[in-house]
Image (cartoon, rainbow, N blue to C red):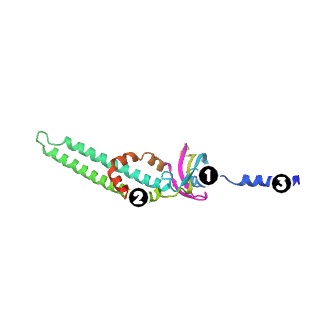
Amino acid sequence: MKKEIIAILSLALLASCSVKTNEEKARDLIESQVKASLIKPESYEFAQLQLDSCFSDDNERNPDTFILVMKVARLFKEYKKYMYEAERAESSMTIYAPSYGYQDAHDKQQQKKYKAEMEKAQRKAATVKEKILQLYKDYKPYYDNLQSAKHEFIGWSVAFSYRAETAGGLKTMGNGLYFLNKDLTEITHSFSEEDLSDLKSAGIEDLQYEFEEDLKSIFAEE
């Protein structure tokens, strides 16, 4: 009888050891995707993993929010570039402005040139701004639904880090953010290190300040 109990306990222990943890399941999924993208997959080394639960009413830990902010960030960067070009052209215009009511042919031509450059850059900036505002308009129904959503578990987010060699043999750190389904059987969304860099440098606070009135109009309560 004693031997039977020991055998049963041993089998139970063996079965429990064979069950993978959530972290191990996430790591297996992500590692296969990461290795497939590496120049030297044989140089891959796992660094760390942070697994977090995602909920239906969480606006921050949500792939759709990440996608919106990433698109907005890249467009806002383009918008600022055009605004800088417009400001630079406007500054050059002042150099060739009439002095004491006099302006020679060369100065007049240069002022006209920079005025055209300024207006062109301003038009481009306005076009990009409209694209940004349209993204927020498209996002509003999702945002409204999020405000009334129940607190339900919808999946996982995973911050993942690893080391691998570049083509030149230099070992560097790689980072990514992944969203997985509830059962940890599928990667639903992934964001590269470049994506994360764009998010960090988004300047969303600057955007919200500069477009404050437009955004208030979009998200005003009906």
SS type, badge 2:
helix
Query: Which mark lies nearer to you, 3 or 2?
Result: 2
Task: Tell me which amino acid carries mark 1.
Answer: Arg
Does the CB distance between marks 3 and 1 fall below 8 Å?
A: no
Q: Residues within 10 Å of mark 2 (few under 14, many from 20)?
A: some
Q: Which residue is mark 1?
A: 27
Q: Give coordinates of residue 11: x percent, y percent.
A: 79, 55
* Outermost top residue: 100
Residue for point 11% across, 39% down: 100
Indicate which disc, 3 or 2, sits on the residue closer to the N terminus.
Answer: 3
Q: Which residue is mark 3?
A: 7
Q: Residues within 10 Å of mark 3 (few under 14, many from 20)?
A: few
* Outermost left residue: 101
Indicate which disc, 3 or 1, sits on the residue closer to the N terminus.
Answer: 3
Q: Which residues are magenta?
A: 170-193
Image quarter hosting the C terminus: bottom left
Does the CB distance between marks 2 and 1 fall below 8 Å?
A: no
Q: Give coordinates of residue 27: x percent, y percent.
A: 61, 51
Task: Tell me which amino acid carries mark 3.
Answer: Ala
Lateral position of residue 108 relative to residue 166, left or right: left
Residue 94 can be seen, yes or no: yes
Q: Give coordinates of residue 182: x percent, y percent.
A: 59, 58
Lateral position of residue 6 relative to residue 61, left or right: right
Q: Which residue is mark 2?
A: 140
Lateral position of residue 177 relative to residue 28, left or right: left
Residue for point 13% across, 39% down: 99
Label 2 – label 1 distance at C-alpha: 34 Å
Label 3 – label 2 distance at C-alpha: 60 Å
Residue 166 can be seen, yes or no: no
